[in-house]
Image (tube, rainbow, N blue to C red):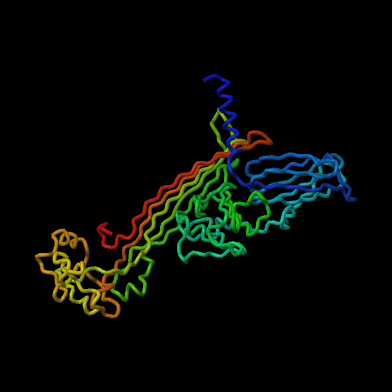
């Protein structure tokens, strides 16, 4: 391939991210730098460094003493201000969440630049740049709080103005409707905008499209009201999952959440009907790993190129007790007389006896006492009956027709796996890119009430 063609392909590749539909999830820091008298100081060098990757954004205050550091990935930062004639200003432990736009004003003190003043970020930051109202579920909360079904978006229930609209119970990572079942600010469920790293993560009908492994999520940002025009594709609020990335240090995690079958008790109705305890267990486990791309004696990606990988697997079997109706012992032999005790509408007629009377109406002969002669019972029907179990439950109210005479404790087993890979590249101080690859596999067996795959 000619070099000109290669350059055109490279240019097209770099343009693709700009064409994608994406809302801004990166943060911005702005502020005013003044001296002790409150006068603005121009020419102050401002350095904003992300701690885990040492990614730096450098800027300088203008003639009004103002500075702006945009496009900051969510994470923990240090802000440094430096100019001759003043002590160095350092603010540590500053956490920026998704889409944060915060104002940090800096007051410099006269002194030697070798001296420094350190300020901790104990005071909560105020978003004074717009009128958006929301809440961030932090990394610590994602890692430490129990997750219903191991689905990070389930933490949306912790935010103000958010109500769950689904039924109580597990929300598996593959439960697309349950994970999106939130009413935000009074809006109906599945009308909210669901994002991952600022990109759309919803199906056509507002359900969750992809749920990352829980240890791969840095934070969950919920906005009950968003005044930013970038978040306009919603009838309610915005739910944004921000993923972790690699860093300068090798880091990782292992987790397992296990509910063994031996600790699950049978429920009241199963005991009442004489049904056994269904097989019930829940086992979710996984790992994450990340760090700089490093090839010995070839390439060291520290401060520049990072990788991150996450994997989880879920194997469970949830109870699915079902009460249905199967043919009674008499009905298996063609005796449906018990149905007549319920009502005349259950009278059976011989289909081979149909005749047309003078009025053009088709009439058929009723089976005496609702009993079908053995000679008219289909061989196919007899063979099918071999796969239908006999009644095992006393019908409610003692109904003679056998309605509700079969109980099944067949469980619903799931086999699920989820893989995520991500690469972050700091091309320069002003240009950064990342991309990720995701894959899920899911197998479920459901409603096998007869234990032979006929249902």
Question: In the shown orientation, is residue 181 left or right of residue 113?
Answer: left
Name the residue furthest left: 375
Is residue 448 in sight in this rendering? yes
Left or right, 427 with reference to 295 = right
Quarter location, residue 424: top right
Q: Nearer the viewer, residue 150 or 373?
A: 373
- At x 47%, y 47%, the residue is 311
Tell me what residue is drawn at x 24 percent, y 68 percent.
Answer: 326
Residue found 56% across the figure and 53% down from its top: 194
> Closest to the observer: 278 or 92?
278
Return the residue nearer the eye: 401 or 294: 401
Q: Can the viewer see residue 219?
A: no
Q: Position of residue 106 (x, y in %)?
A: 80, 49
The location of residue 10, given as percent across then percent down, is 57, 28
The C terminus, quarter of image: bottom left
Determine the residue located farthest toward the top in the rendered image. Answer: 2
Viewer-closest of 29 and 50 = 29
Viewed as shown, does residue 189 lie left or right of 408? right
- Looking at the rendering, which quadrant does residue 344 occupy? bottom left
């Amino acid at each position: 391939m000619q070099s000109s063609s290669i350059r055109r392909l490279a240019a097209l590749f770099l343009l693709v991210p700009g064409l994608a539909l994406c809302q801004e999830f990166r943060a911005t820091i702005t502020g005013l730098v003044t001296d002790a008298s409150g006068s603005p100081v121009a020419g102050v060098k401002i350095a904003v460094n992300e701690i885990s990757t040492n990614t730096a954004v450098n800027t300088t205050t203008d003639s009004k003493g103002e500075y702006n550091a945009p496009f900051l990935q969510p994470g923990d930062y240090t802000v440094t201000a430096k100019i001759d004639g003043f002590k160095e200003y350092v603010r540590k432990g500053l956490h920026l969440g998704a889409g944060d736009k915060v104002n940090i004003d800096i007051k410099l003190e006269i002194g030697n630049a070798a001296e420094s003043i350190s300020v901790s970020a104990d005071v909560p930051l105020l978003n004074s740049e717009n009128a958006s109202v929301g809440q961030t579920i932090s990394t610590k909360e994602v890692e430490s709080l129990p997750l219903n079904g191991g689905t990070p978006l389930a933490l949306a229930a912790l935010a103000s103005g958010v109500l769950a609209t689904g039924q109580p119970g597990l929300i598996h990572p593959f439960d697309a409707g349950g994970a999106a079942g939130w009413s935000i600010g009074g809006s109906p469920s599945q009308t909210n905008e669901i994002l991952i790293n600022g990109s759309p993560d919803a199906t056509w009908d507002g359900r969750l499209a992809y749920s990352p492994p829980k240890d791969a999520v840095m934070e969950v940002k919920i906005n009950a009201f968003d005044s930013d025009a970038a978040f306009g594709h919603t009838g309610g609020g915005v739910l944004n999952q921000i993923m972790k990335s690699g860093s300068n240090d090798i880091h990782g995690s292992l987790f397992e959440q296990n509910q063994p079958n031996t600790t699950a008790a049978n429920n009241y109705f199963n005991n009442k009907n004489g049904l056994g305890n269904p097989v019930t267990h829940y086992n979710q486990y996984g790992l994450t790993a990340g760090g700089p791309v490093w090839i010995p004696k070839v390439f060291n990606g520290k401060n520049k190129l990072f990788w991150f990988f996450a994997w989880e697997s879920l194997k469970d079997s949830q109870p699915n007790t079902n009460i249905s109706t199967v043919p009674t012992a008499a009905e298996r032999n063609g005796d449906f007389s018990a149905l007549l005790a319920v009502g005349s509408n259950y009278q059976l007629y011989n289909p081979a006896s149909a005749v047309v009377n003078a009025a053009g109406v088709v009439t058929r002969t009723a089976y005496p006492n609702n009993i079908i002669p053995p000679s008219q019972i289909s061989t196919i029907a007899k063979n099918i009956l071999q796969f239908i179990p006999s009644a095992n439950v006393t019908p409610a109210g003692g109904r003679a027709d056998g309605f509700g005479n079969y109980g099944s404790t067949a469980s619903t087993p799931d086999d699920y796996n989820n893989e995520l890979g991500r690469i972050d590249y700091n091309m320069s101080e002003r240009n950064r890119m990342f991309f990720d690859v995701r894959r899920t596999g899911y197998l479920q067996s459901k409603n096998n009430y007869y234990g032979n795959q006929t249902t």
